[in-house]
Amino acid sequence: MNTITIECLRYHPESDAEPRFQSWPVPFTDDMSVLQGLQYIKDHLDGSLTFRWSCRMAICGSCGAMVNGVPRLTCETFLRDLYPGPVRIEPLNHFPIVRDLAIDQADFLGKLQSVKPYIIPDAEPQGTYLQTPEQMERYYQYSKCINCLLCYAACPQYGLNDRFTGPAALALLHRYNADSRDAGKAERMEVVNTEDGVWGCTLVGYCSEVCPKGVDPARAVNQNKIESTKDYFFRFFRK
Amino acid sequence: MKRSNKPIFWSLFGAGGMLSALVGPALIYKTGFSSQALGYERALLLAQNGFGKLAILAVIGLFLFHGCHRLYHSLHDFGIHVGPGLKAAFHGFAAAGTLAAAVLLAHIS
Amino acid sequence: MKTYIRPMSGWWKRNPFYLWYMLREASCVFITAYALMLLWGLYRLQQSRIQYEEWRESLSSPLSFAFHAFALVLVVYHSWTWFKIMPKTLPRMPLPDGLVVVGGVAAVVACTTALMVLI
């Protein structure tokens, strides 16, 4: 069995003025993920290490962290690919650290709520909604978002200005605007049109690179710059 | 929620970005590395022609709006806060340059 | 709740992806300066032939050569990135992304060829 050094950023608010790194040698097998490496540390070396996880299969979106400076889901990043190491694990960039690898998600949750991520029908639904495959294709990729926040950790604009609505919330906003069953676009455009809506984006494009589910937030945001521009110039012509 | 006026400046930024992406490389090559380019007679002829005037105005004006928009975003990227005053100064600079080009072109006949 | 917020200073050095982004954005310095240089040339053209020829003369100075060399590299990079991300910035198209990029690059080649012959 090989051993790899895992170097983890630690921060305990009750005793630390600022974060510090701590390293452990971790024995690993070829099938072990970074998350399992962290679990090994917690079970055998230091029970006080704090990190979030749940499903272990890239669907819950809880275990995101910076792995050697790149936002990753630790459950689907394998230690064998990082050998000989060391592996440097930090909490997701741009978020306040609560404790060790756990970040404060409150800001994102507020933003998620602000984009009304649910279908707003224009009338009381009468039976089943019908939707063609083409209509579904317009929003499908955006619906795969698992709110793991890797895109926020990839976005320097969010890091520089945390009022920016950010990639995942705007991608989900677009997911509902692009849905043929939805009639809530006008309400959501109010969020899109603000300085901290789509206009906080400078198309760095890293959000779409790091998404573990194949969502393309950069596309959603930038197509909504066009939507917002149309909304700006044509608002006078609409009744 | 307050609507941003970015659509105006982003459209100008986009038009300038598109124009500089299409003609920028060739123009820079010609003015920088080709001594035969832009002789007086040909340049004057271009500046006297209506379409020529429009082309010159578009290149100077849109390049300025494109550049100035990205410049103040870059200041933000470097952690320098750009307030509404400085933002207006950048756009005003681009507008002044465009106006100057228009006045000069109007004087060439 | 006490939390720790990490500083952003030097963020663009943390990842090569950000360095490429900053390089793309740096092209704007040269595009702005280039537009001002052309504006100056237009001013000289409007004055007289002698003044205009002086301006053209100044274009062959070492300083101008260095400026144009940097400008050319960065604007070519700007041009490439502009069309590389175009599938994301255009409204929804019934075309595959690759075709949009190829179309953009073909337009650059066409414009460059035309300008090389015309001016």
Image: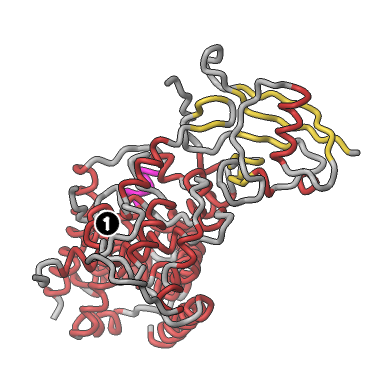
Q: Which residues are magenta?
A: B71-77
Q: Chain of mark 1?
A: A
**Residue C108 placement, left or right of B101:** right
Extreme residue toward the front, this view = A127
Does the magenta-highlighted stretch encompass residue A73?
no
Q: Quadrant of the C terminus of chain C?
A: bottom left
**In the picture shown, does residue A97 fall above or below B9?**
above
What type is the residue that disc 1 sits on? Arg
Q: In this orientation, which residue lies closer to the viewer: A90 or A149?
A: A149
Residue A149 seen in the figure: yes
**In the picture shown, does residue A108 fall above or below A118?**
above
The image quarter containing residue A219 is: bottom left
Residue C39 seen in the figure: no
**Residue A2 placement, left or right of B24:** right
Q: Position of residue C29 (x, y in %)?
A: 38, 54
Q: Residue at x 28, y 41 (%)?
A: B82
Q: Which residue is mark 1?
A: A188
Q: Position of residue A141 (x, y in %)?
A: 49, 65
- Circle 1 packing at 10 Å, graded few (<14), some (14-19), many (20+), is some
The image quarter containing residue B20 is: bottom left
The image quarter containing residue B31 is: bottom left
Q: Residue at x 28, y 71 (%)?
A: A126
